[in-house]
Amino acid sequence: MIDTHAHLDFPQFDPDREKIIFEAKASGIKNIINIGVDLKSSRKSVELAKKYDFVYATVGVHPHDAKTLNDDVLKSIEVLAKNEKVVAIGEIGLDFYRNLSPKYVQIKAFEKQIELAKKLNLPIVVHIRNAYDDALSILIKNNVQEIGGVLHCFSGNLEQAKEGLSLGFYLSFNGTLTYPKSRAQDIAKNTPINFILTETDCPYLTPTPFRGKRNKPSYVRFVLEKLSELFPDKSFEEIEKITEENAFKLFKLGNRL
């Protein structure tokens, strides 16, 4: 089991961070990828990755914080990205639901960070909310198939999923997959299993049966269990193995051990 999208540096984990990380390993989690959302959290993600051998990091500026991405911040992100435990640029993208940064600023930050990822030959972790058509257009325009990446916490429609897959991107699913009447279930069923990643997005989006409580990496098991229901021809162990291989392939984890 691999949690490809966690936020263990967030304050929700301040009381027991190390306990949660050791618990994850004891529960069968092989790797955790901790995701940067701004310069501060990107630094913390790298620190966590340095401290724990099975933890990796991404660095980047989330669309919420796009207004903070000036030349100095971008240069600092680039320096961090050269650490051997950094496996991607992210999470980057567009969020037109909250619009905590103006749309045009989000677009500019997204494109600048795609450019950085291409310069460093790193995949990207993409956050999209209420902006799938715009985000996919930007990905196409910038030839992101050269570096690849993942559409994290995928919540678009089937046509948008197909477009993302046509770029060679992976789709990642988390606890929302376990919610009753979740649209993500139909998307997952129609996605080739060799293009699916598992994540938690902890401390958020906790799966059933712990919905409403703090999420944590060990709960990625419930995502895998739901996937094994959606792919009845495959066992839990088979799906676990395939999604692990997918993560290793995209993030080149095997080359970093």
Image (cartoon, rainbow, N blue to C red):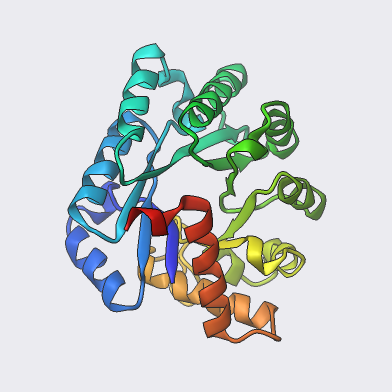
Q: Which quadrant of the view contains residue 167?
A: top right
User: Residue at horizontal 20%, vertical 52%?
Assistant: 14
Image quarter in which the N terminus is found: bottom left
- Measuring from the top left, give residue 139's x and y in whole percent: 67, 33
Residue farthest front in this picture: 255
What residue is at 60 percent from the left and 67 percent from the top?
177
Where is the C terminus found, in terms of image quarters? bottom left
68 sits to left or right of 117:
left
One can see residue 55 in this view: yes
Instruction: For residue 202, say whether it is visible.
Output: no
Above/below status of 170 relative to 125: below
Residue 253 placement: quadrant: bottom left
Asked whether, in this view, residue 43 is left or right of residue 213, the answer is left
Residue 35 at what x, y percent from top left? Answer: 39, 46
Compared with 64, 187 (above or below) is below
Residue depicted at 31% across the width and 23% down the height:
76
Provide residue 115's location: percent of width, then percent of height.
54, 24
183 shown above or below 86: below
Q: Quadrant of residue 5?
A: bottom left
The location of residue 52, given as percent across then percent down, is: 21, 57
Q: Horizontal placement of 210 versus 150: left or right?
A: left
- Residue furthest right as drawn: 159
Label count reads 0
Identify the residue at image location x=45%, y=31%. Answer: 120
